[in-house]
Image (tube, rainbow, N blue to C red):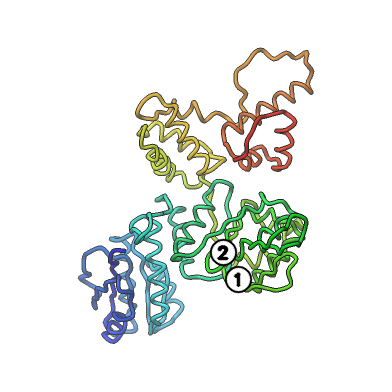
Amino acid sequence: MRDLNLLVVDDDELLLAALRPAMPQHWRLTAHNRPQGLPSGTFHAALIDMHLTGNLQRAEGLEVIKNLRLTNPHLEIIAMSGNLDRDLMEKGLKAGASRFLAKPLHPDELNLMLSKIEEWWLLQGALSRSGRPARAWLGTSAAARDIQKQIASLKGEKGPILIEGESGTGKEVVTELLHQQRDDTALVAINVASVPETLFESELFGHVRGAFTGADQNKMGLAEAAHGGDLFLDEIEALPLHLQPKLLRFLETGEVRRVGGKDTIRVQCRVIAATNRPLQQMVSEGKFREDLLWRISGKKVVLPPLRERREDIRLLAETFLKEDVVRRKTLADDGAEALTEYGWPGNVRELRRVCEQLTLLSPLPMIRRQDVISILQPTAQIDNGPTVDFSQGLPILVNQFESQVIRNCLDRYQDIDEVARVLKISRSNLYKKIKDHNIQWRDE
């Protein structure tokens, strides 16, 4: 980790003397005690006192914040004062500070704040993480920056985290970014929808030998395996209602009892849950427990669909194209425009798949509008074929149309959950239709 720079604008020498030994070693402090003549250089954060001349009737720090915000739009600015007047604090936020701290500063509060700011710079890709491949949340839009802030704000926080967003918006990526904030801990993932209802409790909590037919040995559950780290529950909305109290009890007590066992085991892990459905609506429908929702949603990251962060589409597409180091395709301006104009019902996951197809199929070293349009066909379009024989009757024609639509969607999205969502049917219903139409499909 390279050094990070903190600018402190304050005329209190005692505060400066207390800050230096309290700061992490890789942070460097630059002090300044006047409203004018701010030092130049690259700063990652700034602490600004509201009163710099001893005159409590004037808040010179407000102008300092405004000037810093104009010259350093990405700087994380924190206002501080011993005067906790609400009007003054709100003016500080309005001037451009992201938060307001009460003086005297507590060393633990300072270190936690600096760790979150550091994480924010890491998530933007502006810093590299020591000993690990750099991971960042791609995007420069206001929505992308908000996501980076949400993730960074959870650095050092305990308790469950809920990630909400449509399918393909990057919930798994956010989980990895949250997990990489912790050093050398386990990340154990389970897709709730993929586990048969009768096996879920055993999968999560384990079982003892003889607990049921086929249980020929003791088995550790995924919750135990995640001890000391993170347990990721993807598609938590698929958890059957009668199993939700068992998960709630684990979240509240941290205790695990293997199926068929009598003893309880204490497990310390952070639970990260993800959903692509509005859980509050499921609560209203009686399909999700309200107390479980309260328990998992105290800390939350909300991911917008790609259509709400169109400014990021070109950067994302160019990043995906660079992953193919053999073909080395670039994105022409008109190709980028075509990608940006599209609605992306499958979000970032769909964009990645389209980029893979473009890399493979585009005939030139650059990807043009016509290359993009050739792939981005309407979801339900049927391939050109022979003239329709109306004498077959409507039921047969409807059946043929349904079969072709499902085939096209499967070819397009390559993901059973996305196809079910686009066609607005349940996954079980989609599987039934795949079987009825004898469609060859291997769900990877």
Whether tag 2 and tag 1 are in contact, CB under 8 A, the answer is yes
Q: Quadrant of the N terminus?
A: bottom left
Vertical relation: 320 (above or below) 332: below
Q: Residue at x 52, y 43 (%)?
A: 349
Q: Residue furthest front?
A: 216
Q: Helix or strand or loop: what does disc 2 sit on?
A: loop
Name the residue located 36 percent from the left edge and 29 percent from the top edge: 366
- Is 300 drawn above or below residue 324 in the view shown? below
Q: Earlier in the sequence, mark 2 or mark 1?
A: 2
Residue type at mark 1 is Val
- How far from the left and from the top, in percent, is residue 45? 33, 68
Q: Is residue 178 left or right of residue 404?
A: left
User: Which numbered circle lies on residue 391?
Assistant: none
Residue at the far bottom: name it: 14
Q: Which residue is depicted at the point 65% across and 56% down?
A: 236
Considering the image in quadrants, where does the C terminus appear? top right
Question: Which residue occupies 48% across, 61% down?
Answer: 178
For label 2, the residue is 226
Quadrant location of residue 30?
bottom left
User: Residue tagged by mark 1?
Assistant: 267
Q: Nearer the viewer, residue 186 or 193?
A: 186
Residues packed near mark 1 inside 10 Å, few (<14), some (14 to 19) or many (20 plus): some
